[in-house]
Image: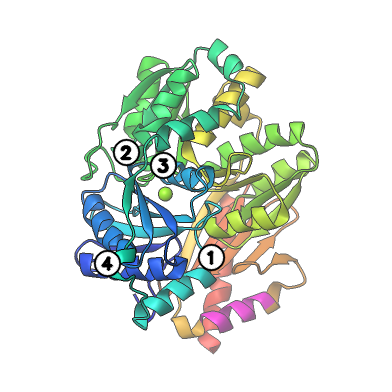
Amino acid sequence: MSARKLFGTNGIRGLVNVELTPEMAIRVGLAIGTFFGKGKNLILGFDARTSGPLFAKAVTSGLISSGCNVYFAGLASTPALQFAVKNQSLDGGIIISASHNPPEYNGIKVIWSDGIETSHEQETEIENIYFDNDFVYAPWNQLGEKRELLNVNEQYKDAIKTHVDTQKITSKNFHVVVDAANSVGGIACPALLRELGCKVTTINANIDGTFPGRLPEPRPESLGVLSKTVQAIGADLGVAFDGDADRSIFCDGNGTIYWGDKTFAVVIKQYLLKNPGAKIVTPVSSSTLIKDTVDEGRGQLIWTKVGSVTVSQTMKAENANLGGEENGGVFFRSHQAVRDGAMTTALLLNIMAETDKSLTQLIAEQPQYFLEKGKIECFDNKKEALQQKIYEQVKTQNVSTIDGVKIWFNDGSAILIRPSGTEPVFRLYAEAKDPAKALKLVESYTEKLKEILSTL
Ligand code: MG
């Protein structure tokens, strides 16, 4: 963490008791409480991590000291806590989670009253309070209180049901396998699916902060057990969550695991059939598949910078109802404008029920793209110049500089060249309908970048 920086892309993250300590968490709680102001009501919950209760207590101390009331929800998914902020008209919330990071990490996310994570400007305010020791302590007789908040998971689950055709889903008797990553994905979602008439088989559903089943990040290569289980029992769908269950990755009845672009495109296609001309929000890192699907459905695509908070905020600003990220985050604003694993699962089942098609069939209808990645070393102080120079070389083409430089070619292929925010590298993501073409794109742009770098 740099001198005056606490927050990364999604909240504060760090190695437990090394980068993120209880002393620090108390001060973060004080800074957040000072930021919201005395008397404000904030929800607080955590995922399965072993250090969750520890940091919950430390942050709670800081909040109470600043005069904020803490509504303690205990174990709950990030989307369930975000929904509760909005649903219970609270002033905000704090989520103790390191999302998809390994078990030795934890983190602190701050939620604004609209249920969306705080903006970078708001985070800077909190950082300034923290680093300047600008804490406002409440007098002894105006300390905040800790209150238990029950039914968070129950209300979240019931709200999701209002956005799908429960009768139609129930009539299909779907069999779904849920891989809960030994965390909060196993709380609301299996119950929701059972209430939707599904037969549910769970794996990694016992809460265990050591994450014995698999690492919390749902990546196709780490979901072998899910894939095999779905195949072995002949289930219709498999879903795997990350540590705080906002992201969801799916597999079809054949056990094929799909990256998030493909399932998001399934959701987009059906959504545009019902909502012609609707706006769809996605980061510029998403596959051309998303663009093709939106174009074909005559929707309006809005590209954003990479990052879930940007997607949420753009959806709000543009009054868009559907957003998504390639890593398995679908945002359905009728419910809430944030990534939501259980909501996404219900949406997919709804589409399978309405179209009477399996996920295999729905994805087979899509154009297929192949992805190739590359990277090149580049010191932080040269990143800006490199990006500018490469842009100058390609600016007459179909190009976007929303985040890095993205170029779309006439044959449907595309490349995104983007400086890493955390490492001294530039990353290249190319895709094409032909895998050799994608590889060639990565190679030729790596050469171009190297040439430019040698002149800087
Ligand atoms: Mg997450």
Q: Which residues are magenta?
A: 383-391
Q: Amino acid at mark 4?
A: Ile
Q: Disc 3 vs disc 2: Cβ atoms closer than 8 Å?
A: yes
Q: Residue 119 has which mark?
A: 1
Q: Earlier in the sequence, mark 3 or mark 2?
A: 2
Q: Which residue is mark 2?
A: 181
Q: Earlier in the sequence, mark 3 or mark 4?
A: 4
Q: Which residue is mark 3?
A: 245
Using the image, determine if residue 428 lies above or below residue 184.
Answer: below
Using the image, determine if residue 448 lies above or below residue 110.
Answer: below
Q: Which residue is mark 4?
A: 26
How far is disc 4 from disc 2 in space, using C-alphas?
28 Å
- Residue drawn at x 62%, y 44% is 333
- Cβ of mark 3 under 8 Å from ligand 1: the answer is yes
Q: Position of residue 190 (x, y in %)?
A: 39, 26
For the stretch drawn in magenta, the main secondary structure is helix
Foreground residue among 424 and 124 = 124
Q: Earlier in the sequence, mark 2 or mark 1?
A: 1
